[in-house]
Amino acid sequence: MRICMVSDFFYPNVGGVEEHIFNLSQCLLAKGHKVVVMTHDYGTRKGVRYMTNGLKIYYIPIQIFYNQSVLPTMIANIPLIRYILIRERIQIVHGHSAFSSLAHEAMHVGVLMGLKAVFTDHSLFGFADLSAIVTNKLLEILLSNSNHCICVSHTGKENTVLRAKVHHSRVSVIPNAVDTARFAPDPNNRPKNNTINVIIISRLVYRKGVDLLAEVIPKFKHYNNVNFIIGGDGPKRELLEEVREKADMQDRVRILGALKHSEVRDVLTKGHIFLNTSLTEAFCMAIVEAASCGLQVVSTKVGGIPEVLSPELIILTEPSVESVERGLKLAIERQILFRQSSHSPKNGLNGKITSNGKSHHVNGINGLTGSSPVFHKRTHSDGGRKDQFSRIENNNSNFSPNHKRTISAGNKSEFNIAKKHFQGPLCPYKCNKIVSSLYSWPNVTMRTEKVYRRVMREPSKTLGENLVSFLKTGVYPFLLVVSLARIILIILDYLAPREFIDICKDFKMKNGQSKVPTRPRRNSFRKYFEKTSHS
């Protein structure tokens, strides 16, 4: 099959969508498919470029409109998109991200040319604010003619079915994946002293919960052996720098700025805990990469995050300052108890943590400083309302399966049970093994191929069927756009016939994989010249 991946977001831009496109393309190339990527130009990066294993990238010269996305004209870029699709003999146009105008436009042109269109939605949207209403309606219009839609989580599928009004039979759930061999643990990279590093890696924007993070960090001002390492950049970076100055935590909060993807693993392996404070998330690749590196993950319970990792790998909290603080304290306490138990088998649940230069006794799971910040007593003797976080922690602790009930600090028998079965965080290498069994790119590629084969069996829609599909969305003026786009394609077939467009050659390796055409060496020209001169 011949596939064209289209998105506004690709290398040198760094993010989850970019990594997904690149890794999926590499796996498809390894299986013998023809894959090209279409995106807009990035500065001086224009024209055609080649990446690993012959992955061909078209950086087309289109003006960026907002947030790395091009202006959604729907007709202005038809000649260029048509030229690339014909030149590469594309069969399937695969668009990525609802924020990408170029992906929607290329899918629209591909459908009018009789090609198959597949769309992968990587995000969640609301229904109330103006931007969500406009985006959802545009998505409904453009997906009405697509052959299939892929979501990265079941929550994302429900969200897409509701906001884009796509029938559930046309939506599949294929999660993201991670290269666990690349994101392997390295405990030797962690600090040798009693320091506990909390890692945060994300874009510093509102949607990633940076405002929530800015309120959580000062809560740990008095825990001198807890440091924060923040990777990423964005408009909210100034807020974090301001909070760091006000809390006088310059030596304990490091803001690294934007990271290359090759640098992420080195930062993750320096930490013990990974903190994610996203307010909305369809999948969250960052927590999977962190778990693969052996970190204890603390994350807000939003979107599709609860279905990403198994309970022993993640502590889920509500998206509030108090809940995130409790979850982070629990993760820190687990690290301390596990560290102390490894040095003192008999008294494994007793340890110390430094606060303001003083050592405080840690007694079991009662808290970091002898109090009970994590678990609270029941409000009634008959088992009335319990603390909300107790229920969350109960579902994500490492207690024995036979003791899944909520542990109350005031109940000695339950406390002894928890003390007996508490084992702390999992071994980093075991975490990596669990993640590798859950998410792998070969599995994602196999499931994506099934979607491709399914859409290839579907008959192509006529112009009348396309117009009827758009008519059902209720946006009648868009029929004029579709009609105009079809007229432009007819004119282009007359002015620039398909037979006048050069078809790209497919370079094959011995094993059948695509190969980048390389310039012959100078010695090759010399040997050729000598051979022809003697003949």
Image (spheres, rainbow, N blue to C red):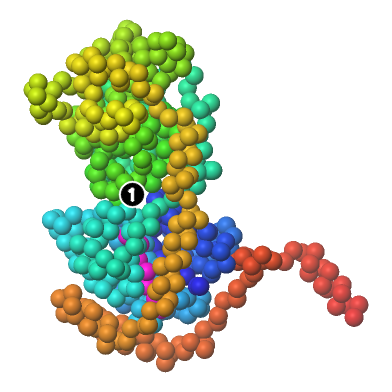
- Along the line of sight, the residue nearer the viewer: 34 or 79: 34
Say left or right for 45 vs 238.
right
- How many C-alpha atoms fall within 10 Å of the one at disc 1: few (<14), some, or many (≥20)? many
Q: Residue at x 24, y 44 (%)?
A: 302
- Along the line of sight, the residue nearer the viewer: 193 or 295: 295
Q: Which residues are magenta?
A: 115-121
Height in image: 450 above or below 343? below
**Element at badge 1?**
loop
Magenta segment, prevailing SS (helix, strand or loop): strand
- Quadrant location, the C terminus: bottom right
Mark 1 belongs to which amino acid? Phe
Does the stretch in magenta take in 119?
yes
Does residue 23 appear in this view?
no
Q: Residue at x 28, y 70 (%)?
A: 143
Residue 399 percent location from the top left of the image: 33, 27
Q: Which residue is mark 1?
A: 283
Height in image: 47 above or below 259? below
Residue 93 percent location from the top left of the image: 41, 71
